[in-house]
Image (cartoon, helix red, strand yellow):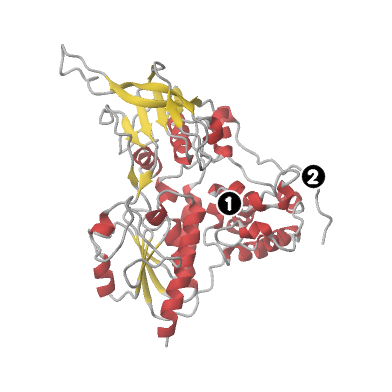
Amino acid sequence: MATANMNPNRNPMPTQDPAVRARNFDEVALGYTEEMALDEAKRCLNCKNAPCVTGCPVKIRIPEFLAKIRDKDYEGAYQIITESSSLPAVCGRVCPQENQCEAKCVRGIKGESVGIGRLERFVADWHNAHCAEDPVLPPQNGIRVAIIGSGPSGLTCAGDLAKKGYDVTVYEALHVAGGVLVYGIPEFRLPKKIVAKEVETLRKLGVKIETNVVIGKTLTVDELFEMGYKAVFIGSGAGLPKFMRIPGETLNGVYSANEFLTRSNLMKAYRSNPETPIMKGGKVAVVGGGNVAMDAARTALRLGAEQVSVVYRRSMEELPARREEVEHAEEEGIQFRLLCSPTEILGYHNPDDPRDPKNGFVTGISCIKMELSEPDERGRRRPVPIPGSDFTLEADTVIMSIGTSPNPLIKSTTQGLAVTPTGGIVVNEAGLTSRAGVYAGGDAVTGAATVISAMGAGKTAAKAIHEALSPTIE
């Protein structure tokens, strides 16, 4: 084994200049060069108990793929990753490795952890650039399985089952496969050609994808079983946006982050003459502090906003978005209005001229400043309003990014499917729902979470489906 690189700092990720990238939709992170990847892979100590693997929801054999990089066997590294992950180029870009595999890395005790996510991206991009061979189609067993939703949980479940020879069909409500990967995550973080490439690889494994099919309307779960499917996996995500229920949320210029990002990402509203309308320019306020809020704020900036503010009721220490995304947003000039909360969205009203075209449009947000209480029994500091601290923030567009919940359509059209009070589908540890033969995972179960956790749920369900159906294989 080559001598380990004991530099306490990881190789920095090359990025576009902030002043340039703030006005384009090209990918911000440019990826490691081969020299950087080799140097970074040598920082791995090849720990005997591999704690990094325990932090990975899909259990990629991380030390082994890093060893392949050190040997310059990049295709070998790719093959190790794809034994566990169907979406390596995606995960290498958007997964919060700093809270998962990298959080367990021994190198992080006295320095920075190994850049595992950056190396996964390097390997996947190398494979996509150098390898044109189709994956080997496994022997088919003839058993049909239906997947509802083509997001990360659905694609993972589909890929794992296809590799075992199942006849898998994915049903997607929208006109493009990829789920949140195409409608939710912006191009500058995850180029759509990357998602399309991953989806095409699954097609070559035999996965069939039917778009424009809304399960619960076009077809029901019951009808899927009548069509001959032996199991159904629900990976429909959590696309129902939440609002604060404050005055003014019905004004023109108020969006949910889901709508705003879908119009831009999937329906190409950033084009000069878009088919779908979207508010561009002016002053934009984004309410929320998660990754979706960062995506919405940075998208608004690229659409031409002159000023973008993120309004969050806690401090920077509690901000749930990935630190890298927050740093990128700050570099691009996005302002953070911390420790304040909206109380009302204000709109224009001209009582003298009801036909004034500006009537009903957003003009700003009334906010109140907050302070954090003492930690509760869970260690959480609750934001408390400061009396008399009200102020107005000017805004032409307001984007609400305070969370989502599962769409109730499937549960309302499927008999015997237990759900939680918040709308999540109830499953056991194997992903099985209260209905025989029906499995679920990802945001449809947990509410909005990470791509990799959804993939882990899809992988768990695929394993359970195979264990349930394999005895029937002739």
Residue plotted at (51% across, 41% down) = 377
Q: Circle 1 is placed at which residue position?
A: 92
Where does the image place residue 270, in percent across and percent down from the top left?
40, 35
Where does the image place residue 49, in percent across and percent down from the top left?
71, 63
Q: Circle 2 is placed at which residue position?
A: 7
- Judge whether 181 appears above or below 223 on screen: above
Q: For residue 70, which quarter of the picture?
A: bottom right
Does any portion of residue 203 appear in the rendered image?
A: no
- Point out the residue furthest to the front here: 377
Q: Nearer the viewer, residue 372 or 2?
A: 372
Residue type indicated by callout 2: Asn
- Judge whether 86 appears above or below 278 on screen: below
Where does the image place residue 55, in percent across and percent down from the top left?
60, 56
Residue type indicated by callout 1: Gly
Nearer the observer, disc 2 or disc 1? Answer: 2
Q: Which mark is residue 360?
A: none
Q: Nearer the viewer, residue 40 or 427?
A: 427
